[in-house]
Image (spheres, coloured by chain):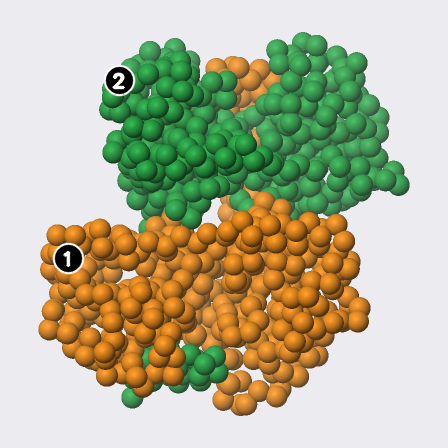
Chain colours: A orange, B green
Amino acid sequence: MSEICQLATSDSDFQQRLDQLLAWESVSDASVNNIVNEVLGNIRRRGDAALLEYTTRFDGWEAATASDLEVPLARLEQAWNNLPEAQQIALKHAADRVRDYHERQKGESWSYQEADGTLLGQKVTPLDRVGLYVPGGKAAYPSSVLMNALPAKVAGVSELIMVVPTPGGELNELVLAAAHICGVDRVFAVGGAQAVAALAYGTESVPGVDKIVGPGNIYVATAKRAVFGQVGIDMVAGPSEILVVCDGQTDPDWVAMDLFSQAEHDEDAQSILICPDADFVAKVKASIDRLLPTMEREPIIATALKERGALIVCKDLDEACAISNYIAPEHLELSVADPLTLVEQIQHAGAIFMGRYTSEPLGDYCAGPNHVLPTSRTARFSSPLGVYDFQKRSSLIMVSEAGADTLGKTASVLARGEGLTAHARSAEYRLK
Amino acid sequence: MSEICQLATSDSDFQQRLDQLLAWESVSDASVNNIVNEVLGNIRRRGDAALLEYTTRFDGWEAATASDLEVPLARLEQAWNNLPEAQQIALKHAADRVRDYHERQKGESWSYQEADGTLLGQKVTPLDRVGLYVPGGKAAYPSSVLMNALPAKVAGVSELIMVVPTPGGELNELVLAAAHICGVDRVFAVGGAQAVAALAYGTESVPGVDKIVGPGNIYVATAKRAVFGQVGIDMVAGPSEILVVCDGQTDPDWVAMDLFSQAEHDEDAQSILICPDADFVAKVKASIDRLLPTMEREPIIATALKERGALIVCKDLDEACAISNYIAPEHLELSVADPLTLVEQIQHAGAIFMGRYTSEPLGDYCAGPNHVLPTSRTARFSSPLGVYDFQKRSSLIMVSEAGADTLGKTASVLARGEGLTAHARSAEYRLK
């Protein structure tokens, strides 16, 4: 029998138990901070020499010279060419769809002119150089390369630098192949906090970048937080989550497997079902019990469901939406008859999967939208990774002679009100 | 005689000296971190009781009960009504223009349908509740209230909570009046790390928010960094900067005053002129020497120019643009004959002021664009504060039965390649 928390919104302690379920704090302890600070300082001061040392120490292989840390683009192409055809077709299919969706996110410059000739606007430009961190080992996902690299390329980033640790010197063929079809510009076989530092500060071999994106372990996350300001960073993600809102009419096995697909990521992942039909919830529980022993990653799924999962019986779908907005889930499935009406009530979610056929894994791989999504309730204020994360804006202001007269009078009054008289006089010089 | 660094791009050590000029690192030392952590912990655990204690201790006035910390909206209206008419007109003029410009930044939801009936899109929604920090004392700028509050209101944020410390219990009338015309929903007379904590965690009196914006001292900045993740935050700003690119044909007094208008903010502010005409640079230096003694904030300006200012002679305007892109200034003035052509070469800048009539202070107050801008070279990867900072996006995916068959096959191949078989099986259930 699988273990999973069962709740009803009518329970007197429901809100409290929900908050306990959702509680998550990622803390970098002092020892992690100390190690990361040491690594950052060393790479900043000693560049390649330190990078080589850390790679030997942490990844367990020795590069003869710093230039050996770079993986030639021909090696990426070779990885692609050696891929089984089914994987080539699938990767290409996914890349094409992701690219197509993200093209629609591209921001454009705009401007307008006022009656007195004053021009105002906003200029949108891509970042120059972006670093993409790809984890090594078991969490090296080619789909993650696609999801991080393609929005940057669509934005027009001119140089995309990938770093990937190669424990024991072993390269991940699928990751290299994915980098190849995304048009990654350079790849370095380095990882950990030392790779983040190299990208942030630059070394003799690794060019400094303007922003670093991509997932990593606690050392990578801590290093990214530390270099923020020097460079931009993406969100620091928490464990993955799914909330399935169901009307009780979807095949319970489908719902169970959707919950599993999130839980199999790792033991901290969170899978929650909310449904007004208690009988259906019992059926999903039975599906979980029956299917769990058949899963390849059963121990991970079992732990995740036990520690962080929940099956919730609610009053109706309106209440389900209200709770969903409170949770602000990373992935939200609306497995209901009329999702287009229900979605009107949804305010906070990373990605919304509508209808019984829209299983969450389609979004992870190939539907088109990004799979890098806000976790741990941050969908209340943040968004999926997108082209907009690789573009930035500059305000445009060109005031005409007449405009300088009108605006200057206002600026002068306000500046003097704030006691900033140089501001006032600068504006006053341009009065007629 | 004023002191200001004079450089030429032809100097052999130019790049090194430029880097020294630009170097800026804001460090929260251990004592600041300790105080902030204690404050955050106390507010989180003890709510209003701790908030009252800190207000007494740090702001030097005693509120009888927590409800006395709230400033009634009628008090804001009263501040507005008591304002001299010239200030009312100026504030209203500025607010109208800022609102009008920002309306154009509003993101809209979009979606599209594919041939097999699959729907993809992005839903754009405002944040529910935003906290606006307004500094007390000498840095309490009504213009800053406008620039932070109006984009949130344009985005559709339903509740905008302002906090402002009132040292000695004294309210700033201009700040209250500005809050009134922006439609701020609630105001609390609290400040410092304790105000940030109250907004992030919520207390019995102060509602918890989803994002906190607005400038503050090192305690406020450190607290914002610490609560990031729990809530969203805006950029942590460094000292203000201006770079003036001039062709040598603008009135040198105008250029000198524009440099002053940045330098008067504080001793760390940075004002740089770059121009290919050495004679003109000498004239600006003479204007600086002549005008500086006439300035109300002379000591601040003199220190800022001496410590962080520079007059740079360059080869030509192309080189000036290249250096500007390296500096990625917060404010960039293109004080040249044909700014619309030159701006094509500009890639990284917070706001670009084009033409001799467009003095930077017009942008600070009333041109329309935001005056909260990326500092310290972060314009390489970040943008002015805007409506987009108060909206977030959710991906929309509704896959048709036919789409689930096509996409499911691809997802299955990729998921199995990554060893995520629950993902694969979830997709495979939906195959025909």
Dot 2: chain letter = B
Please give left or right for residue A183 compared with residue A346 in the image.
right
Q: Position of residue A190 (x, y in %)?
A: 66, 66
Q: Residue at x 49, y 26 (%)?
A: B365
Q: Is residue A359 above or below residue B68?
A: below
Q: Depth check: B237 or B178 in front? A: B237
Dividing the picture into quadrants, the one containing residue B300 is top right
Q: Depth check: B380 or A320 in front? A: A320
Q: Position of residue A92 (x, y in %)?
A: 51, 80
Spatial CA distance of label 2 from label 1 is 39 Å
Which residue is disc 2 drawn over?
Answer: B64
Dividing the picture into quadrants, the one containing residue B403 is bottom left
Q: Residue at x 42, y 58 (%)?
A: A238
Q: Residues within 10 Å of mark 2 (few under 14, many from 20)?
A: few
Q: Secondary structure at mark 1?
A: loop
Q: Position of residue A117 (x, y in %)?
A: 53, 33
Please give left or right for residue A95 compared with residue A314 in the image.
right
Residue type, numbered disc 2: Ala
Residue type, numbered disc 1: Thr
Q: Secondary structure at mark 2?
A: loop
Q: Depth check: A273 or B334 in front? A: A273
Q: Quadrant of the N terminus of chain A?
A: bottom left
Q: Is residue A388 above or below residue B52?
A: below
Q: Residue at x 56, y 80 (%)?
A: A174
Which residue is disc 1 drawn over?
Answer: A9
Q: Residues within 10 Å of mark 1 (few under 14, many from 20)?
A: some
